[in-house]
Image (cartoon, helix red, strand yellow):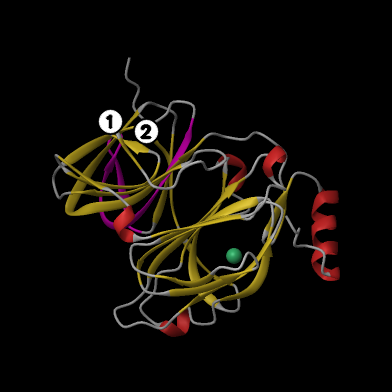
Amino acid sequence: MNSSCEAVNIFPSVTTMEGAGVKLRRGIGFSEAPSFDPFLLFDDFSGDDPADYVAGFPWHPHRGIETVTYLIRGDVEHGDSIGNRGSIGPGQVQWMTAGGGVIHQEMPQPVAGGMVGFQLWVNLPAKDKMMSPRYRGITAGEIPTVEVDGGSVKVIAGRFRGVEGPVREIVRSPWYFDVSVDAGRYLTLDIPTDFFTFLYIFEGDGKIGEKGAGVTAKHIVKLSGGDSLKAIGGDEGLRFLLMSGEPIGEPVAWQGPIVMNTEEELEQAFYEYRNGTFIKKG
Ligand code: FE
């Protein structure tokens, strides 16, 4: 018995300032997160003008979450307290499990041709919030593109028509796809019924669900439960990120880059950050 995922809420990402002065578009944040469990935040830091993004995100802590950075165009230099240094380039993904604590910086570099990039925060359940931090850098060539009738799907995490993405053994096994639908065509995706799913439309326009809700670029689409998603490309085609994951259902205590279950845990985290004991030596 098939049940179709339908758009239950469609709203635009909103321009905001973050980091040391990065102008970005926030898709979901603090006020949306309670109804997007297990996801906390989604930012679109795409831009044509380097002045909008070069201030970057200098050294800051994270605890209790995973941060997922996906770059389509541009260059983001990064470094962290686990010892990673490098740059994220076009088509690459950085999947960082902050766990008990990471201090890092993420600095977009000025590039010709503009920046297209996104960051997602995935919550961790209480039992994993203090796990050892992990970092995965995934190159463009490691991400399979599944060509199907009507479009193509880059499988970063999760499974599409038998093809599994390279980001595996993630705590809540969230799915992350980059989906392209050709103009005037459609494709369908199977979705786990117990997952919560949302989309971020970033190119073109089209329709979502059997009911055919109209969607345009720079919009978040929150979906109802179901086991399949139909997406139809408009005149220019449609391209979106699909993010899907099993809800956690625990209390959220959130301040800035740290997300725990209780206020006491938050206070503890900021106390440790101030006195230099934030990073746990494995
Ligand atoms: Fe960060």
Element at label 2: loop
- Residue 11 forms part of the magenta stretch: no
- Indicate the quadrant containing the C terminus: top left, top right, bottom left or bottom right: bottom right
Element at label 1: loop
Contact flag, marks 1 and 2 (Cβ < 8 Å): yes
Q: Residue at x 39, y 54 (%)?
A: 219
Residue type at mark 1 is Glu
Which residue is denoted by mark 1 in the rendering? 210
Relative to 182, is 194 above or below? above
* Residue 261 in the image, given as x and y percentages of width and height: 75, 44
Q: Looking at the picture, tell me which residue is in the foreground, 142 or 178.
A: 142
- Residue count near mark 2 (Cα–Cα under 10 Å), binned few <14, some 14–19, many ≥20: many
Q: Looking at the picture, tell me which residue is in the foreground, 216 or 177.
A: 177
**Any part of residue 143 in sight:** yes
| Majority secondary structure of magenta residues | strand
Q: Earlier in the sequence, mark 1 or mark 2?
A: 2
Q: Which residues are magenta?
A: 195-217
* Residue 188 in the image, given as x and y percentages of width and height: 25, 34
